[in-house]
Amino acid sequence: MNCLRLDLLYEYLEGALDAPRRAEVEAHLACCPDCRAAVEERRLIHLASFGFPNFDVPADFTRRVMARVDAGRSTALAWLAAVVGSLAGVFLTFLAYVLITGQSLIGVLTSVLGALGKGTQVALVWLGKVAKLGAIILPVLKDLGENLVKAGGQLAASAGPGFFVATSFALLLLMVLAAIGLGRRLFAGERS
Amino acid sequence: MSSQSDEFDLVKRALRGDKEAFEAIVMRYQQPLLNYLGRTTGERELALDFAQEVFLKAYASLASYRPRYKFSTWLFTIASNHLIDHWRKKKLPTVSIDQTVDFGDSPMTLQVADPRACVARQYELTDLRARVEATLRKVPPALRELFVLRHVNEFSYEEIAAIKKLPVGTVKNRVFQAKEILRVLLEEAV
């Protein structure tokens, strides 16, 4: 028999080999000191791989889990109630409309479904336009943002804290001036 | 662990809204689940959060449990998927289901004529166990997980194969590979 392969060695250590195979391995180990040494070292690591200490479970762990289970159930029930309530509301409105106007049930249903279909069509067209616009604008905005951050970083690295104080002051001044200007514009009618 | 029919009974009661039945399930599995998540992530607080999430996911999908599987296998499959999601988010390497580990082609082939001293013999079993425990954190996550399922949770290879949806042979090879990596890391640490 050749020297042991790893899988055979570990199966031997785990006692997973059938009797003939095990006898074959033991016969080889009896005459191969290298394999004996390899098996011995792995046997020790194998033994040390069992019996790790348990992680401490906090005393209130079960209570915490059950509290979250309860919260989840309440949320699910609230959603269910909201859905059922909405459906009931839609149904009652529909019923009231039919009763008050005296229109036929089929006629109202047809016009509602028609309006829904048209609305969906318009919404889909707009959604497509927004998606197209987003696909064009988003990469530009991303690049712009990245470049602004990069430029800000470089400026900060070269200018130091004095620059930030000056910039903050200028921005504050600009905001105050803008507020004053806006105020004058808004109340211009009242003064005259 | 108790019998499958007993656990299925608890599941049925929990599905009917019996809170105490699910509480019994939590109490039964919190320790093995925390050991698994703790040893695999290496972080107790994270493991506690994950254990809660896993129990909540299990509760939400209790109706999908079938008694032909062991409840522990079902629960640990949820836990394992939760870990895989976590590793993907952290961009840690996960071993693909199709990927096979072949000792014949890997550097993990048995070095029978290893000239280095036998590191394991230098320690008492308790010390060696503490070193193995500490070194386990350095084993790649996907292999560490299988090692933990086998050695900490003491699942059979067949059960691990069911949890991970992998062939039994692949599971065995990966557990052996994890042990070889551990051995090499222990030697390097000396």
Image (cartoon, rainbow, N blue to C red):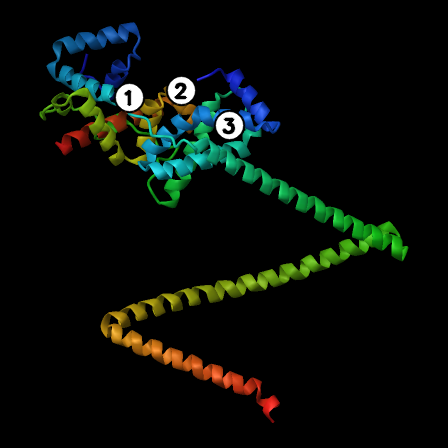
Q: In the image, what residue occupies the spot 30% across and 76% down? A: A165
Q: Tag 2, which chain? A: B
Q: Residue at x 45, y 23 (%)?
A: B28
Determine the secondary structure under disc 2: helix
Residue at mark 3 = B23
Q: Are marks 1 and 2 on the same chain?
A: no
Residue A37 visible to an observer of this rendering? yes
Q: Residues within 10 Å of mark 1 (few under 14, many from 20)?
A: some
Q: CA distance from mark 1 to mark 2?
A: 21 Å
Relative to residue B85, is residue A159 depicted above or below?
below
Which is in the foreground here, disc 1 or disc 3?
3
Q: Amino acid at mark 1?
A: Gly
Q: Is residue B77 left or right of residue A23?
A: right
Q: Residues within 10 Å of mark 2 (few under 14, many from 20)?
A: some
Which residue is disc 1 drawn over? A51
Judged by depth in the image, the label closer to the viewer, 1 or 2, is 1
Label 3: few (<14), some or many (≥20) within 10 Å? some
Residue B173: image x %, image y %? 30, 24
Q: CA distance from mark 2 to mark 3?
A: 28 Å
Q: Is residue B166 visible?
A: no
Asked whether A83 or B117 is in front, the reply is A83
The residue beneath circle 2 is B158
Type of amino acid at the residue the image marks with label 2: Glu
Contact, CB < 8 Å: mark 1 with mark 2? no
Q: Amino acid at mark 3?
A: Glu
Hey, which residue is sitting farthest bottom in the picture? Answer: A192
In this rendering, do the residues under marks 2 and 3 share a single chain?
yes
SS for callout 1? loop
